[in-house]
Amino acid sequence: MEKLMQYVWQHKLWSLGDMVTNDGKPVRVIDTGLLNGDAGPDFFNAKVEIDGKLWVGNVEIHVRASDWHRHGHDSDRAYDSVILHVVEKDDAPVRRSNGELVPQMVMRCSPLFGERYANLTSTATELPCASQIKNVPQLTITEWIESLAFERLQMKVERLFSLYDTFCGSWEDVCYVTFARNLGFGINNDAFEMLARRTPLRLLHKHSDSITQIEALLFGQAGLLADNELSAVPYYRHLQREYAFLANKFELRPMDGSMWKSFRIRPQNFPYRRIAMLAHFIEGGFKMMNELLECHGDKELRRLFTVELQGFWGNHYTFGGAPSENLHTALSNSSIDILLINTVAPLYYAYGIKTDSYAMSDRAVELLESLRPERNSIVAMFAAAGLRCDDALTSQALIQLRREYCEARKCLYCKIGHRLLSEAAKAE
């Protein structure tokens, strides 16, 4: 509740009308001050006129005035600079450490404000503001969507910067781990990243002239060569022998194969074919980052990821399954879209920042604007509420909105929520 009061004060959402201290002196707020996220008074450097006299100092906010004593502020000199104590319930006078009374004021807000806040944050409804979004000005929504898109992109970039530091500035290693992770397509992301980290490029490049040894290393490290019942399959048995030799030579330890998930996944999306695809890009040396930088436009990028697997994986979904005649490219167009959104665009943006190349950062945004929006339950939910989604930049923004604001019920920090709450606060 105190956080809500801070929000009301910060954005001046109190009820219009006379504002007076508990002893009847008129109050005019000139500047609410700077919200303090650390220890000490809630707002620094506020400007408040009390009974015609200007005061500059700090403001403390409590639900009950008696919280001042309960929190020990009356003996804490850090609170001697408080020029106004703002409360919801005036149940006690408050004093500074030298015994002086602190001006105190009850802050009132429209009852509709509290009701709307409760409805937004406490309801079990999936999207509590769905019926009200249409009332928010389009300019507010457009600006918020753009901000969210860059917020999500920046979150991904921070992850890439961490990898950049881990791999001492090697962009190919950053690209390798990022690409591998995103081959998990959400369900197996963590497993793929673990596989990439346990099977570094420096090891794979020693055997980059042999697709069999690359596949043996990747499938072995993935913990997917431990099923002796599959040893009757010649290809599987051959990979087992290769991995046993390499694991002994390089002292390798495989992952727990149970980490991989295939339940309710279409056969073409099974992790086996995704691992085989990763091996395809490593054969001859992994140089994807360099290839991405040389690509111009989404057509060239699509050609890079339009891959037909050869050998055993040219007609198999799993090690033990029967051959299939229906396998074509390793990735569908929608899967390539997802890789462009989650791998290429963040890499472009991060590379642009590290190299001070605005053109490269712009390429990331232009790529997202050129791609179709993702098709998922989040985009569908917002579309039903009236938020249009015409490209991947917008769908990424909507995912950010859902994950970081709606699910966390951070309506106070959402511009849509703020608009709705502001309107409620002004209602009589």
Image: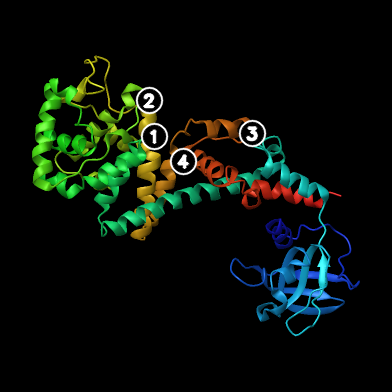
Given the image, on which type of amino acid does mark 4 rest? Glu
Q: Which residue is mark 2?
A: 265
User: Gap in Å between the C-alphas at discs 1 and 4?
Assistant: 25 Å
Neighbour class for label 3 at 10 Å: few (<14), some, many (≥20)?
some
Please provide percent x and percent y for residue 127: 63, 36
Q: How are the colours assigned in the image?
A: rainbow
Residue type beneath disc 1: Ile
| Residue displayed at 38% across by 52% down | 159
In this rendering, the label closer to the viewer, 1 or 3: 1
Task: Give the quarter of the figure containing the N terminus.
Answer: bottom right
Q: Tell me how far mark 1 sits from mark 2, CA to CA.
A: 9 Å
Badge 3 amino acid: Gly
Of the numbered discs 2 and 3, the one sitting upstream in the chain is 2
| Marks 1 and 4, the one that precedes in the sequence | 1
Taking 358 as reference, is 198 above or below it? above
The picture places residue 168, in percent across and down from the top left corner, at 26, 60
Q: Nearer the viewer, residue 174 or 261?
A: 261
Q: Nearer the viewer, mark 4 or mark 3?
A: 3
| CA–CA distance in space, label 2 to label 3 | 31 Å
Residue located beneath label 1 in the image: 187
Q: State if disc 2 and disc 1 touch (CB < 8 Å).
A: yes
Pick whichever of labels 4 and 2 is earlier in the sequence. Answer: 2
Single out the mark in the foreground, 2 or 3.
2
Residue situated furthest right in the rendering: 24
- The x and y percentages for residue 50 are 84, 75
Element type where label 2 sits in the image: loop
**For mark 4, what is the residue?**
369
From the image, tell me which residue sits under label 3.
386
- Badge 1 vs badge 3, beta-carbon distance below 8 Å: no
* Marks 4, 2: nearer the viewer: 2
N-terminal-most mark, 1 or 2: 1
The answer to which of marks 4 and 3 sits earlier in the sequence is 4
